[in-house]
Amino acid sequence: MAPPYPSGLFHTGSGGYLVAMTLDEAFADLPEVRRAQARQHKVQHVVTCVVLSTLSGNTSWREHGDFVQRHRQALLEFLRPGKDRLPSYSTIRRVMIALDFEELNAAFHRWARTRIQAEAGEWWAIDGKCLAGSGTNVHSAEQSFTFLVSLYAHQRGLVLQSGAHRNSKGDEGQVVQAILADARIAGAGVSADALHCKKSSARSSSGVALST
């Protein structure tokens, strides 16, 4: 059964509850990234449009702009923007490029967690991959790149949580431990690369068992 929407309580399956929210509510606290005179649309509205468009299979700025125009009436009814203004593809591009990834990522996960929960006896996998095009000095000892670590359920095809990190500021293991500590899947099993299954971390403080 779906959780009450948008302001009910959702049971996490591990003894806790989360407040269900709409996408627009989840992005309400994202900071403004534009000059005052350039603000014709709320940041939360821009991001909501992009997420809805992405969930519909769109990936480019132009496609996001076309999505907004194609679903204009539905978006106006849902978002209720001032003066019935919805963002163009150029506004979408400017706002999304300027946003901080970690803040956006955290806001999206707050919403997603009210709709995804670990099931009894379920196994998850966690792994990190380097993002294409993010590397610098790739042929030297000073190489730097961004890697994205994701916690996902194979059978359901769901990503519960992810985190991006620069290798120059720490290793993948730190990100893995931070994700597991915050994932609320106590009692679940997680498969991971052998480097994450050291004696000190084979069972994390979150109560999640790691296995290769």
Image: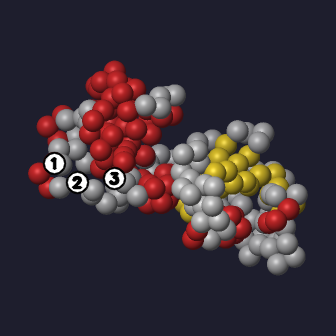
Q: Quadrant where the C terminus lies?
A: bottom right
Q: Secondary structure at mark 3?
A: helix
Contact between labelled residues 3 and 1, with CB atoms less than 8 Å apart: no
- Which residue position is annotated with label 1? 38
Contact between labelled residues 2 and 3, with CB atoms less than 8 Å apart: yes
Amino acid residing under circle 2: Arg
Which residue is situated farthest in the bottom direction here?
200
Q: In the image, residue 30 lies at what x, y percent?
A: 35, 58
Q: In the image, residue 168 lies at what x, y percent?
A: 58, 68
Seen in the image, is 10 located left or right of residue 154?
A: left
Vertical comparison of 64 with 10: above or below: above
Q: Secondary structure at mark 2?
A: loop
The image quarter containing residue 144 is bottom right
Colour mapping used in the image? secondary structure
Seen in the image, is 41 located left or right of residue 50?
A: left
Q: Nearer the viewer, residue 182 or 120?
A: 182
**Looking at the image, is mark 1 or mark 3 earlier in the sequence?**
1
Residue 190 in view here: yes
- Which residue position is annotated with label 3? 98
- Which residue position is annotated with label 2? 34
Dot 2 crowding, Cα within 10 Å, few <14, some 14–19, many 20+? few
What residue is at 73 percent from the left and 55 percent from the top? 126
Q: Quadrant where the N terminus lies?
A: top right
